[in-house]
């Protein structure tokens, strides 16, 4: 997939911008707070309908504007295609367009412009909290499986509603009558999430192990283990079995959930562990090992998406190269011999010879 052109209108700090890109490496250069990450956010949003930094769509609309727009011309699936999102500052739902036709969900644009983002926080993802690991996995899985994206959206919606019931039941005990209905649906959709995740993490772990092997000269054995609700004995079991497992666990935590007014159990607490030759990285990994393993995971994400769509996804490297020592920089750069790459950095230094340089200042292209 190649993003050929990008147009922004009232997106973040961009008032209006039109950019064209190279099929290979595009280097986005500029001082701090000029709009480099905003540009990568626009690209990744255009491809997935999800932002890697905004909590709400309205955050992406330029301060003071009523609506914003991101559109692009893409060469994908052997033809030219266009994508367009219109975002509103109020509560009006966003609009999605593909090749001039209006679409209902982001799932209908899946595969046109898949992207993989790599930023400095990802380097420590195996050390930090589970939430960032879930986000990292979801970012890719949502693009790979539109049905997963839809299930995750529904799960989060039910979770919000259930949390409200748990918080309000002290004042309105009658609300507990509808709780079982919510629990059942939550477990059904949750089971679907677990089923998708089990398969995804299995492939991701296998692919990352190959990269890690090349990287470490085969001296360490990389293993990824998906961790979900403890009552789930086999995450590859049927969805109905998984639903039952989740319901069992929920039942055992019924009292505790009421008392704490929190949704204590479910795949919204999922995580994964990485170990090297049996040693858990979260607890014992060195800085270097953790970074190398994180790079292997990112390259694996890219490979999985490439395999799925038959074309390399667009790789977005946000400030990450300058965070790496020369050995790791070279490993990453040597792995991305093909496909389109966007690299942001403040000081281009040795990267300028990699491809086209685009300079950004205060939300405008120089
Ligand atoms: P750094 O090198 O520090 O990472 P950057 O070039 O990546 O900087 P961005 O994260 O892209 O910078 O942000 C640039 C600016 O965009 C920030 O100063 C921020 O205040 C501004 N900004 C973010 N959202 C909006 C918005 N909705 N409207 C207007 N400006 C915004
Ligand atoms: Mg930035």
Image (cartoon, rainbow, N blue to C red):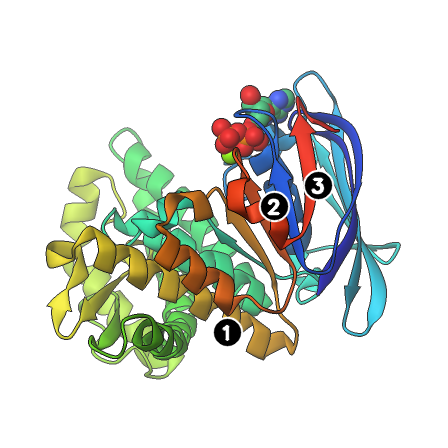
* Residue 263 pos. (x, y %): 27, 48
Callout in the foreground (1, 3):
1
Q: How far apart are marks 2 and 3 (CA)?
A: 37 Å
* Residue 225 pos. (x, y %): 25, 71
In the rendered image, which residue does mark 3 sit on? Answer: 94
x 31%, y 80%: residue = 241
In the displayed orientation, state which residue is furthest to the bottom.
237
x 20%, y 46%: residue = 257
* Residue 336 pos. (x, y %): 54, 66
Depth check, front residue: 343 or 247: 343
Sooner in the amino-acid sequence: mark 1 or mark 3? 3
Depth check, front residue: 242 or 18: 18
Depth check, front residue: 359 or 295: 359
Q: Is residue 322 above or below residue 333?
A: above
Depth check, front residue: 4 or 23: 23
* Left or right: 291 as drawn, with respect to 365: left
* Secondary structure of the residue carrying numbered label 2: helix
Q: In the rendering, which numbered label is found on residue 352?
A: 2
Q: In the rendering, which numbered label is found on residue 304?
A: 1
Decide if residue 50 is in sight here: no
Location of residue 79 by image quarter = bottom right
Q: How far apart are marks 1 and 2 (CA)?
A: 29 Å
**Badge 1 residue CB within 8 Å of ligand 2:** no
Sooner in the amino-acid sequence: mark 2 or mark 3? 3
């Amino acid at each position: 997939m190649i993003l050929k052109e990008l147009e922004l209108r009232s997106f973040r700090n961009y008032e209006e911008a039109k950019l064209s890109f190279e099929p290979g490496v595009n280097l986005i250069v500029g001082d701090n707070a000029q709009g480099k990450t905003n540009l990568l956010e626009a690209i990744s949003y255009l491809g997935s309908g999800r932002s890697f930094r905004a909590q709400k769509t309205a955050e992406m609309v330029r301060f003071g504007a009523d609506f914003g727009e991101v559109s692009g011309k893409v060469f994908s699936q052997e033809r030219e295609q266009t994508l367009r999102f219109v975002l509103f500052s109020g509560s009006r739902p966003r609009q999605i367009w593909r090749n001039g036709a209006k679409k209902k969900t982001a799932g209908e644009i899946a595969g046109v412009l898949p992207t993989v983002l790599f930023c400095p926080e990802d380097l420590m993802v195996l050390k930090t909290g589970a939430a960032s690991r879930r986000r990292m996995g979801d970012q890719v899985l949502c693009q790979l499986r539109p049905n997963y994206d839809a299930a995750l959206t529904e799960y989060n919606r039910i979770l919000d509603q259930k949390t409200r019931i748990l918080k309000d039941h002290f004042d309105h005990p009658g609300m507990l009558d509808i709780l079982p209905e919510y629990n059942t649906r939550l477990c059904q959709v949750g089971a679907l999430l677990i089923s998708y995740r089990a398969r995804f993490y299995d492939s991701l772990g296998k692919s990352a192990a190959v990269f890690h092997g090349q990287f470490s000269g085969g001296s360490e054995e990389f293993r990824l283990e998906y961790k979900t609700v403890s009552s789930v004995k086999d995450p590859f079991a049927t969805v109905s079995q998984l639903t039952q497992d989740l319901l069992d666990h929920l039942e055992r935590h019924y009292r505790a959930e009421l008392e704490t007014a929190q949704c204590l159990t479910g795949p919204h607490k999922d995580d994964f562990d990485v170990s090297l030759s049996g040693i858990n990285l979260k607890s014992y990994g060195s800085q270097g090992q953790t970074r190398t393993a994180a790079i292997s995971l990112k390259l694996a994400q890219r490979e999985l998406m490439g395999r799925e769509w038959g074309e390399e996804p667009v790789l977005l490297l946000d400030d990450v190269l300058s965070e790496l020592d020369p050995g790791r920089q070279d490993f990453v750069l040597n792995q991305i011999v093909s496909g389109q790459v966007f690299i942001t950095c403040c000081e281009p230094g040795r990267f300028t010879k990699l491809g086209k340089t685009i300079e950004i200042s205060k939300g405008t292209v120089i």
